[in-house]
Image: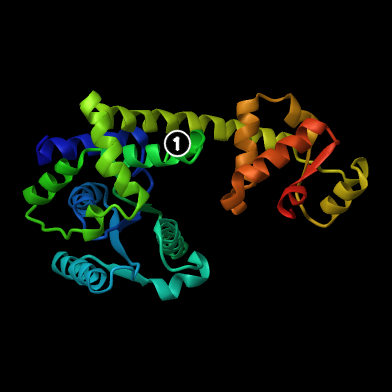
């Protein structure tokens, strides 16, 4: 597809999913790579059509030394030339949220999301990030290998399309040299598993990306059902609860009655339990199993602290 066709596709997708409705100020996550520069090229005209203000957000992870500083300088130059506000975040100022060690893919992801949370707290309506069909395919394979559920599968164009968008707009981009190495698991999938799948079916990346979109819609449905379930099962009267649960409720801790949880569809229950343990999701599967056991035992009431204190 050429630039105009891609722009029209993105415009139609945003309209269909109501992504820009009611938005007054968006932040664009721009690393300087081809994908994020294509995002910038596509969102500028769409934001102008809707009267939406744009701010660019750049995260310098500090993991690649001089090349990371080069990327930051590149994004600063682009924003100055285009007259776009820019917010740059460095690893040191986000350490409280992202934690340690200051290395690895998981830490870099936490750092980016900490940055996005700060931007949203300052009045930005939403943060737009660039994900191609190749990105979605890699992420899906990576998470399936780690044992993800529906929610993880729900998290395109192709890489060549994003570069074509940049060229059509006269924009350059920078290349992350670590993408060529096999030090990271995602790179090994990119260089090995995906080419093998595409060798079997040339539409493999496209089909995996479509699956992610379908999973996202199913995830939204089950999330709504899970919210309704937890609301209906939420305990309100401490007098009717066993001693520990009654004390927890009086102390302001959340408590849910196990009977309505036990009677619900297992898929909805699974989604509800995932939402409860999200703050401790590094140990997610352990807590999911523990909470599920408590529900199955039918002890009358389930406290979130029953799980997280282990």
Residue nearest the observer in this picture, 23 or 118: 118
- Give the percent coordinates (x, y) of residue 174: 17, 60
In terms of image quadrants, where is residue 11? top left
Is residue 25 something that shows in the picture? Answer: yes
Q: Residue at x 45, y 36 (%)?
A: 144
Specify the quadrant that holds the N terminus. top left
Q: Position of residue 240 (x, y in %)?
A: 91, 40
Q: What secondary structure is found at the residue carrying circle 1?
A: helix
In this view, 90 is above or below 176? below
Indicate left or right for 276 with 161 as reference.
right
Q: Residue 88: x, y in percent?
A: 32, 70
Q: Quadrant of residue 76?
A: bottom left
Q: Which residue is mark 1?
A: 144
Q: Nearer the viewer, residue 90 or 176?
A: 176
Q: Give the answer, above or below, for where 83 lies relative to 175.
A: below
Q: x, y (%) of residue 264?
A: 69, 25
Total marks in image:
1
Judge from the rendering whether residue 286 lies leftward or rightward of residue 23; answer left or right: right
Image-based side of 171 in relation to 112, left or right: left
Q: Residue at x 17, y 45 (%)?
A: 162
Instruction: Judge by depth and name the residue closer to the eye, 279 or 3.
Output: 279
Colour scheme: rainbow
Q: Residues within 10 Å of mark 1 (few under 14, many from 20)?
A: some
Q: Is residue 176 visible?
A: no
């Amino acid at each position: 597809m050429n630039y105009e066709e891609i722009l029209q596709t993105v415009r139609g997708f945003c309209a269909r999913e109501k992504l820009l409705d009611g938005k007054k100020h968006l932040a664009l996550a721009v690393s300087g790579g081809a994908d994020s520069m294509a995002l910038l090229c596509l969102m500028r005209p769409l934001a102008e059509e809707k009267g939406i203000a744009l701010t660019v957000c750049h995260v310098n992870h500090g993991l690649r030394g001089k090349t990371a500083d080069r990327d930051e300088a590149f994004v600063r130059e682009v924003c100055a030339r285009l007259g776009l506000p820019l917010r740059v975040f460095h690893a040191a100022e986000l350490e409280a949220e992202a934690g340690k060690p200051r290395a690895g893919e998981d830490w870099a992801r936490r750092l980016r999301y900490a940055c996005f949370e700060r931007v949203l707290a300052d009045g930005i309506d939403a943060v737009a990030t660039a994900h191609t069909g190749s990105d979605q395919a890699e992420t899906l394979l990576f998470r399936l290998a780690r044992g993800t559920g529906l929610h993880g599968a729900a998290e395109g164009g192709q890489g060549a399309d994003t570069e074509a968008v940049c060229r059509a707009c006269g924009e350059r981009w920078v290349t992350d040299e670590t993408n060529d190495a096999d030090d990271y698991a995602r790179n090994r999938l990119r260089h090995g598993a995906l080419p093998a799948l595409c060798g079997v079916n040339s539409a493999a990346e496209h089909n995996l990306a479509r699956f992610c979109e379908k999973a996202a819609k199913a995830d939204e449905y089950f999330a709504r059902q899970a919210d309704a379930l937890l609301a209906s099962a939420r305990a309100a009267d401490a007098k009717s609860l066993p001693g520990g649960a009654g004390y927890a409720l009086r102390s302001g801790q959340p408590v849910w009655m196990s009977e309505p949880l036990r009677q619900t569809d297992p898929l909805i229950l699974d989604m509800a339990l995932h939402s409860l343990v999200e703050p401790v999701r590094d140990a997610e599967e352990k807590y999911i199993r523990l909470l599920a056991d408590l529900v199955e035992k039918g002890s009358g009431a389930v406290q979130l602290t029953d799980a997280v204190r282990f």
